[in-house]
Amino acid sequence: MGCKVLCPRVALLAYLMICEHVRAECTQPSFASRNVILSANHLSTQIFLVGSTVTFECMIGHKPVDLKASRSVTCEGNQWTSLELSCTRKSCGSLADFLNGRYDMTGNLFGDTAKPVCDKGHMLAGKETTRTCRDQGWDGRDPLCESVKCSAPPAIENGQLEDEPLESYDYLEAVSYRCNKGLNLIGQSTLHCSEDGTFKPDPPKCFDGCPTPTIPNAKRIDGKSPPYKLGNFIVYKCEDGYKLEGVASISCRENGWSPEPPRCIAAPWVVALIVIVVIVLIGLGK
């Protein structure tokens, strides 16, 4: 009789204790929007009992907005109390200009970058290295910007420099080309040492003229005879029984004949006549 009264009460009490135990715990807290992380000694724990207290710290590269703000939260019931700590990106400060150059910066806070840019007439010595704002400040060091130097300009076919070439040239220093006698210079005769260490524009070409076109069954009816120099033209006409395919008039340009020389194609009746002649000749041979 006693068990009928006591046992249900004991079972109910045990059930309530279990429910209280299940209810009175918190999962691992997270406040990512505040740029904070759990302290290392709490990272491995996933479930916290009621009354547990954990502490947070700023993420790497961040610092507290308010140094007096509380860094801890407590598990009350099944949720955590509010966290006062909030962190913001650290500042590395602005980078000063360096000798013959400056920095192109995205900002001066943690994670921002600074790309070195040399003044006009100077170029980076060695590989370009972008600096980054880290937890302890800017990484790397100021680069070295040297005066631009150009190596000797390239040689050209059928032409040469007006003066003897030097081993190197300073920024904006100029060189001039000339062609061999009787040739036309195509392009700019004078080049300058540019800011990237090369001569610009591209060197000129010395033009020796256009080759004499060979067009079977065609004859020249206008224009000069060979040799053909820049600007010369020719007008062609096909012989009787042939049809001109292309443009009759062509001009000598710096890249050759323009448009391409035409062709003379045999008319259909000429082709038929040739076939008949071949057949007859074969027959006579038999």
Image (spheres, rainbow, N blue to C red):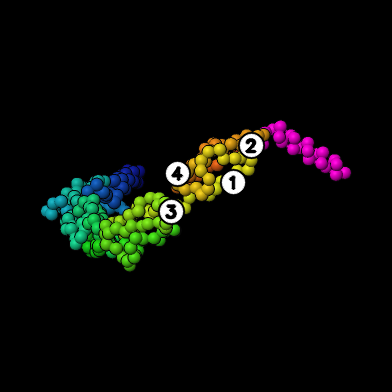
Residue that mark 4 sits on: 231
Mark linked to residue 183 = 3
Mark 3 vs 2, N-terminal side: 3
Say which element carries label 3. loop
The residue lying at 54 percent from left, 36 percent from top is 247
Residue that mark 1 sits on: 214
Of residues 121 and 73, the one nearer the viewer is 121
Residue 164: give x, y in percent of width and height: 34, 65
Give the amino acid at mark 2: Glu
Give the amino acid at mark 1: Thr
Mark 1 vs 2, N-terminal side: 1
Residue that mark 2 sits on: 239
In reply to whether residue 279 is colored magenta, the answer given is yes
Q: Farthest residue to the left: give it.
A: 68
Examine the residues drawn in magenta and state their main secondary structure.
helix
- Of badges 1 and 2, nearer the viewer stands 2
Instruction: Using a 10 Å C-alpha cutoff, classify the residue at mark 1 as few (fewer than 14 neighbours), some (14 to 19) or many (20 or more).
Output: few
Please say if the residues under marks 1 and 2 sit with CB atoms less than 8 Å apart: no
Please say if the residues under marks 4 and 2 sit with CB atoms less than 8 Å apart: no
Mark 4 vs 2, N-terminal side: 4
